[in-house]
Amino acid sequence: MNYGVVIFPSKNLQDLANSYRKRYDPHYALIPPHLTLKNVFSADDDQIKDIADNLRSIAKNYDPFNLKAYKVSSFQPVNNVIYFKVEPTPELEGLHHDMHKKNILNDEPEFAFVPHITIAQKLSNDEHSDIYGSLSMLGVDHEETIDRFHLLYQLENGSWTVYETFRLGKES
């Protein structure tokens, strides 16, 4: 089965992202707006129990932290993804690192970690140019406290749902 680890931002930021995603993101109906900590990976039932145990212990090593989305950016020319850029924090960097180094999968991420929330993807070059040109003028200024992350699994129809939620902090 396919799994992933994400942070879901507040409803306010999700609503803002969805106002663009419903037009520009074919994954709009499959998963809410999110910040990916660990990309899609496969695991069986036994492995996922061990992975969840590891994620639980990783969560205890981090206190809740401030997430700040501050502008619209793009991954072009690597790919035509437009996103809300999220300010990197030691907590985000640490969570991402620990999920790749201390988890039982112990894998290398495919790309450098750029904290973001996707608002448009799978665009042609012309679409990307037009949409990015207008969205890059948006003033994004959102701050909130993050106190949890989620292990998700993919359903047969391609949508994602929460397998387990992990609260940050030693008391969790």
Image: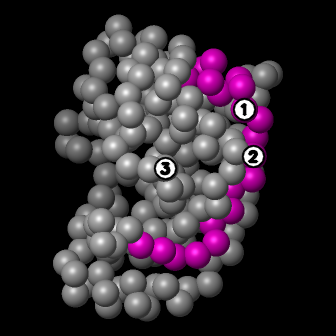
* Side of 163 relative to 159 (left or right): right
Of label 1 and label 3, which has the lower sequence position? Answer: 1
The residue under label 1 is 62
Task: Tell me which residue sits at (59%, 62%) in the image.
Answer: 86
Q: Residues within 10 Å of mark 2 (few under 14, many from 20)?
A: some
Task: Tell me which residue sits at (45%, 11%) in the image.
Answer: 50
- Would you place residue 155 above or below residue 49 in this image? below
Inspect the image, locate mark 2, and give the three-letter code of the amino acid beneath it.
Phe
- Closer to the camera: disc 1 or disc 3? 3
Task: Report x, y in % for residue 99.
Answer: 51, 30
- Give the number of the disc on residue 65: 2
Instruction: Please check the rendered image and state whether residue 58 is part of the magenta-colored stretch, yes or no.
Output: yes
The residue under label 3 is 113
- Would you place residue 144 above or below residue 122 in this image? above
* Side of 36 relative to 2 (left or right): right
Task: Report x, y in % for residue 53.
Answer: 54, 14
Label 3 residue SS: loop
Which image quarter is the N terminus in?
top left
* Side of 137 relative to 143 (left or right): left
- Would you place residue 150 above or below residue 142 in this image? above
For the residues labelled 1 and 2, say whether their Cβ atoms are less than 8 Å apart.
yes
* Side of 114 relative to 166 (left or right): left
